[in-house]
Image (cartoon, grey):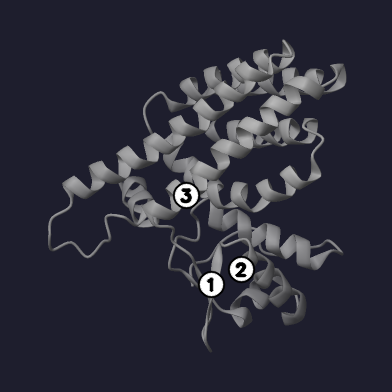
Amino acid sequence: MKDFEPLAIPHVRLVDEASRAIREVILTGELPPGSQLRQADLAQKMKISRTPLREALMKLEQEGLIAVLPRRGFRVVDLKLEEAIELYELREMLDGLAARLAAERAGNDVLEVLSHLINKMDKSVRRQDAHDWLVHHGAFHEEIFKASRNSRLMGLMANIRLSIQRFHPLLLSTQDRLKKAFREHDEIFRAIRSHDPNAAERLARRHIASARDIIIKLSLDEARNESPATEHDPKSLGSMRARRKRQ
């Protein structure tokens, strides 16, 4: 199994910290799709016992990031194009609704937080710092869902957001995506600040649809460039990301 960091976990909440550490290396692509996760190896690397580790792995399985291999541990799941499209279709609806409700319900405290995050994202774009961008990008969307004041909506979004996060490095590898994504987020923020629910929903849905269309285009372009004898599945988004990373 490929080595990765972070390893040691000093915190008391071992299950949450173990799932967070493993989730991070999956979503960043450090553990690519198809990688096998053996509990004995992970327990030694992360310096925890197998009981909290297994609970953490089961949590990641529920999130759709890994799958059980009978008598062989776990495997990092690779999403197919069709599955990615389904996730983005759900995300488009949920983000649109969250933005609409946020525009109707957000107070000045929420708007101040969103404004702060937009400024942080702007600085990330100017520095071309994709990692910093992703941190503030995630916080921005989370704040919008909180502003919706709909706990059911937030619950529905949690697992979908985690599954889609694995596509972020691929999206940001496309030319000028960082700048375009910032403009889209800034427009969403302005609509929420203006308490315009129709515009907020429309812009939020358009933002997610734009990301979905990029994923589809990248997959189709990759399929056209593959020879018939290739060992790769052209509809495998994980293998596509791995090949782009090597280029």
**Residue holding disc 1:** 67
> Viewer-nearest of labels 2 and 3?
3
Q: Amino acid at mark 1?
A: Ala
- Residue 210 percent across, percent down from the top left: 44, 30
70 vs 98: above or below: below
Cβ atoms under marks 2 and 1 closer than 8 Å: yes
Residue visible at 24% across and 41% down in the picture: 221
Please state which of residues 152 and 29 is positioned toward the viewer in this rendering.
Answer: 152
**Residue holding disc 3:** 86
Residue 163's disc is none
For mark 2, give the secondary structure. helix
Q: Residues within 10 Å of mark 2 (few under 14, many from 20)?
A: some
Q: Residues within 10 Å of mark 1 (few under 14, many from 20)?
A: many
Q: Amino acid at mark 2?
A: Glu
**Residue holding disc 2:** 61
- Residue 80 percent across, percent down from the top left: 39, 57
Please state which of residues 81 and 139 is positioned toward the viewer in this rendering.
Answer: 81
CA distance for labels 1 and 3: 19 Å
Quadrant where the C terminus sits is top left
Q: Earlier in the sequence, mark 2 or mark 3?
A: 2
Residue visible at 46% across and 69% down in the picture: 35
